[in-house]
Image: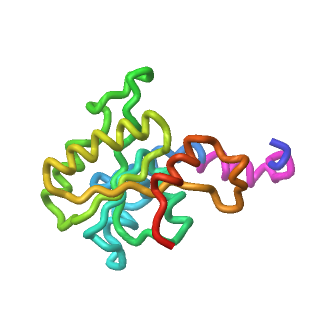
Amino acid sequence: AFYLLDWTPDELQKFSNRLATLKEKIYPCETCGCLKDSPSCAFCNSPTREPKILCLVSSARDVYAIEETKVFKGLYHVIGGLLSPLEGRSIEQLSLGKLEKRLQDSPVEEVIIAFDSTLEGDATALFFKQKLDQIGVKATRLAFGLPMGSSIDFVDYGTLEKAFTGRSVF
């Protein structure tokens, strides 16, 4: 709020107008669910993306967090949340049908499940892994482990356990 107080009335008006039309100008891609502001999706229509690898995420926000790493070069599919009986979110609210159709219509060989490391994330990951196994698509999950720059004595037991069980050859 203090930052906005330094703006001129014209700057505030422009900002207000853009904010008011945000939902009209930014909307989810019909194919992947990522946010876009033009008819063409920057991810689905990019010739530099690897179409054989699909990253399954719960929200469009996760896409942009992954993109910041500049590591993943495949495509995305946003499911629209995680299974959560307490919040009334069941599989019917997630985009399972769109994902199944997309997997039938495209050359996807691997789906990377990139959900939060929570009970809801784990339950959703298990559900989608079972579905992917049924249709014969390889399912992988992001590795878990110690955060960069962390000290072992400050890491929670769950993270430490996953770091040990998911260890790799060095």
Please provide percent x and percent y for residue 87.
44, 23
Q: Residue at 22% x, 47% y: name it.
A: 98
Residue 10 located within the stretch drawn in magenta: yes
Is most of the magenta stretch helix, strand or loop? helix
- In this picture, which residue range is highlighted in magenta? 4-18
In the image, taking residue 74 as reference, residue 117 lies left or right, namely right
- Place residue 43 in its image quadrant: bottom left
In the image, taking residue 122 as reference, residue 156 lies left or right, namely right
Please provide percent x and percent y for residue 45.
32, 70
Placement of the N terminus among the 4 image quadrants: top right
Across the whole image, how many numbered discs are drawn on residues?
0
Please provide percent x and percent y for residue 120.
43, 34
Residue 133 located within the stretch drawn in magenta: no
Q: Residue at 74% x, 54% y: name it.
A: 11
Colour basis: rainbow
| Viewer-nearest residue: 31 or 16 | 31
Q: Residue at 60% x, 41% y: name it.
A: 157
Q: Residue at 43% x, 54% y: name it.
A: 35
Please provide percent x and percent y for residue 19.
60, 46
Whether residue 81 is situated above or below residue 65 in the rendered picture: above
In the image, taking residue 137 as reference, residue 5 lies left or right, namely right
| Viewer-nearest residue: 36 or 105 | 105
Whether residue 140 is situated above or below residue 159 in the rendered picture: below
The residue most toward the bottom is 48
| Viewer-nearest residue: 123 or 87 | 123
